Amino acid sequence: MAEEKLTTRAEDFSEWYNQLVLKADLADYAPVRGCMVVKPYGWALWENITSWLDKEFKATGHVNAAFPTLIPMSFFEKEKEHVEGFAPELAVVTHGGGQELEEKLVVRPTSETIIGYMYAKWIKSWRDLPILIVQWGSVLRWEMRTKLFLRTAEFYWHEGHTAHNNAAEAKEEMYRILDIYERFCLEEAAIPAIKGTKSDTEKFAGAQITTSIEAMMWDKRALQSGTSHYFGQNFAKAFEIQYLDKDNTLQFAETTSWAISSRIIGAMIMVHSDDQGLVLPPRLAPIQAVIVPIYKKDDEKVKVMEVADRIFMELKAAGIRIKMDDRDNVSSGFKFNDWEMRGVPVRIEIGPKDVEKESVALARRDRPGREGKTFVPQVGLIESVSALLVDIQAALLQRATEYRDANIHDVTSYDELKEVVKDGWAFSYWCESKECETKVKEDSKATTRNIPFDQPAEEGVCIVCGKPSKRKVYFAKSY
RNA sequence: CGGGGCGUGGCGCAGUCCGGCUAGCGCGCUUGCUUUGGGAGCAAGAGGUCGGAGGUUCGAAUCCUCUCGCCCCGACCA
């Protein structure tokens, strides 16, 4: 329950975030270092996220399956870059049933290796391809510094793993998924994420190409909100995923993997929420509208509840995710603040005056306080609430888009770049060399986020070294 | 792993430097009455042995040693 005010974003953004997650009832700290408990309200939000994605994956031919949590240690040693990337953050099981294990087992930090192993077993012929499997579950990475949702030791996600019989199709798959992720961000989460390619230093351990969607948080830091990788034949060679092609030649498969994690909840918080608490996009909100009945005496209560109950049933029947707040032990003022803290998009207040006038008060969460309140007739309320939900969804996306665009700056000199990334993103030409990328990181703590797919027609020169450059990249401090 | 902070009823804290009598306070919780259109009021209650272990002492939340854990800031990452 939300008892008191939040630290404001301007005071201390990190503290604001920590308090918000707890007070909005999304998650709690678990008794294990770096781990979180996702509370029912947070999980309901996650379920709305996953069900949309699940539907999209199935619509594009993917199927779900489950692979084990424990992976033999030796699997990690088969792909050189992969093991180097993940070795520092592995949790290892050394004992089982009171005995020391002959081969240590790793708690999966990601499942490329064990799925690669299984694919090698399953794939024999070109007829077995493509194979398009998604696993929903959790993984564990021994993180040094953790934060609820954004970076926890254990986190929840889906990981898609596909195998194909040619590179073009595998790359197409990578881009197809990235498009789904982008649509999810735009249409569902109201986050204007930018699609692009990761630099060599930022790409996934073992990938040939890593693409990402990058979003700007309220504090203007970037958050990688989804990734899609093309592995070429790296994992196929490490795990011997081979098949006989139509011409009877032995070929290595081309594989991909991709993921969006529970971190996306952190992104939604940091993009939309305000000093009153959580703000959720209506399409994903577990509760889209809450009814707060207001009354003084018992005879008022009877009349108010009669109307409130009727409206509740009507809106519920219309498919709106609605909640009746009939708590008798807290004041209506408390309820207003409480539901604002929890980010419910629309609040419907029904009091004696509304019963009389056959109206209700509608309050929209994206404009907190009294400013967001309007009075509308009870007749046609389904339509007015539905329209308001659509309007809020659009307003959140628009506001986030304007904010993002206002804080991305085209820069043409290195000094300008260093200045801009202190409080925003810089967009500039870059020669794609590791040296220039490292220099920027050392000088300003900003890293390359991604090289967006949409590029200007003309070419330019690298912001750091001045050599000719064909593509522009985003530089920003990131989470 | 380095730096900082913190472990005292469910939550937030005071008390710790300068040991001492019944370990306080706010919020929350329970019960009752009055309240309810922007975080209600009064009254009566319940609830802790002070993160853990050892030590010093007549006496330890307080001093000493060890230990466990959490949070924040930096180097790695969805």
Image (spheres, coloured by chain):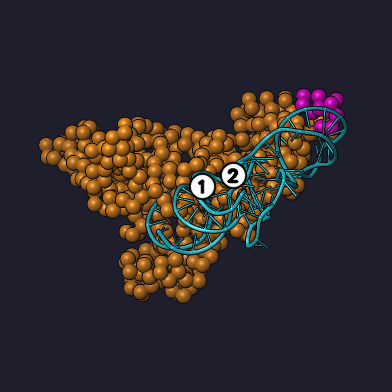
* Within-10-Å neighbours for mark 1: few <14, some 14–19, many 20+: many
Horizontal side of A461 relative to A127 (left or right) equals right
Who's cyan, chain-wise? B
The x and y percentages for residue A352 are 83, 32
The x and y percentages for residue A270 are 55, 51
Which residue corresponds to the image point at 61% horizontal and 35% vertical from the top-left? A287
Tags 1 and 2 both on a single chain: yes
Q: In the rendering, which numbered label is found on residue A148?
A: 1
* Residues shaded magenta: A295-306
Disc 1 is attached to a residue of which chain? A
- What color is chain A drawn in? orange
Q: Please tell me whether mark 1 sits on a helix, a strand or a loop.
A: loop
Q: Please tell me whether mark 2 sits on a helix, a strand or a loop.
A: helix
Q: Earlier in the sequence, mark 1 or mark 2?
A: 2
- Image quarter where the N terminus of chain A lies is top right
The reply to whether the magenta stretch includes residue A297 is yes
Which residue corresponds to the image point at 36% horizontal and 57% vertical from the top-left? A202
Query: For the residue marked with disc 2, what is the amino acid?
Result: Leu
How many numbered circles are shown?
A: 2
**B56, A95: nearer the viewer:** B56
The reply to whether the magenta stretch includes residue A90 is no
Q: In the rendering, which numbered label is found on residue A22?
A: 2
Query: For the residue marked with disc 1, what is the amino acid?
Result: Leu
Which residue corresponds to the image point at 34% horizontal and 55% vertical from the top-left? A203
Q: Main secondary structure of the magenta part?
A: helix
Q: In this view, does A398 lie above or below B31?
A: below
